[in-house]
Amino acid sequence: MDEVHFQQYGSRCQMWIPPEEKDPVLLHHPTRKSVGYFGAVRLRDGKFLAAREPEQFDAQTTWRFLRQVRRVSRRSGRQVMLIIDNAKYHHANLHCAWRQAQEPDFHLAYLPPYSPDLNPIERVWKLVRRLCLHNRYFPRLELVMGAVEAQFERWAVESPVLMRLCAVG
């Protein structure tokens, strides 16, 4: 589980530059518009769960998403271990009692600080950017949300791509 922001403008791009141009400058339209999402992948079958977060990521919004993941995972009747980074709001006092009450069936495994490469969902965010946002211009934030959420819907059922992408071990 992790969170991500997708911006309206700007993406990595590859372009041909004449060899005589030593230091090309590519200007982007200035903006701070972005949309945030929580996301989680079930490693067993690659099923993806996402939730848009219009405000900011904090203890309250994290708790809301954790409860959503718990509700969905309860249906399987299996034990769940959620790999999560060490952001302060991921282990806030606000939802500490709730997390303890869910154990051992629903356990949060915190990654060591400064180790985003260990979180499998980081690869999912990179793939979403490449598939949906790379080298595309979005004049409105709603178009970014539409492109990203359409991909999320395709992954809401079993996804062999996400299963391979997030394979651990």
Image: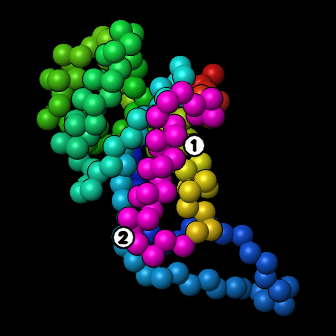
- The residue under the point 45% across, 62% down is 144
Residue bearing mark 2? 33
Residue 122 horizontal side relative to residue 110, left or right: right
Residue designated by label 1: 123
For the residues bearing labels 2 and 1, Cβ distance under 8 angstroms: no
The reply to whether residue 124 is in sight is yes
Q: Residue at x 41, y 35 (%)?
A: 49
User: The residue under label 1 is which amino acid type?
Assistant: Arg
Residue under the image location 37 percent in, 49 percent down? 37
User: Could you tell me which quadrant the C terminus lies in?
Assistant: top right
- Percent position of residue 50, x then y: 39, 40
Image-based side of 166 in relation to 37, left or right = right
Instruction: Determine whether 114 is above or below 42 in the image.
Output: below
| The residue stretch that appears in magenta | 137-162
Of mark 2 and mark 1, the one earlier in the sequence is 2
Q: Tell me how far mark 2 sits from mark 1, CA to CA.
A: 23 Å
Measured along the vertical axis of the image, is residue 3 above or below residue 132?
A: above
Query: Which residue appears at 26% of the width and 40% of the height?
Result: 62
The residue type indicated by label 2 comes to: Lys
The crowding category of the residue bearing disc 1, from other C-alpha atoms within 10 Å (few below 14, some 14 to 19, many at least 20), is: some
Q: Is residue 41 left or right of residue 15?
A: left
- Name the residue nearer the viewer: 47 or 85: 47
Q: Position of residue 157 (x, y in %)?
A: 49, 30
SS at badge 1: helix
For the N terminus, the quadrant is: top left
Disc number placed over residue 109 in the picture, else none: none
Q: Above or below — where is 3 with respect to 166? A: below
- Give the color scheme: rainbow, by chain, secondary structure or one colour: rainbow
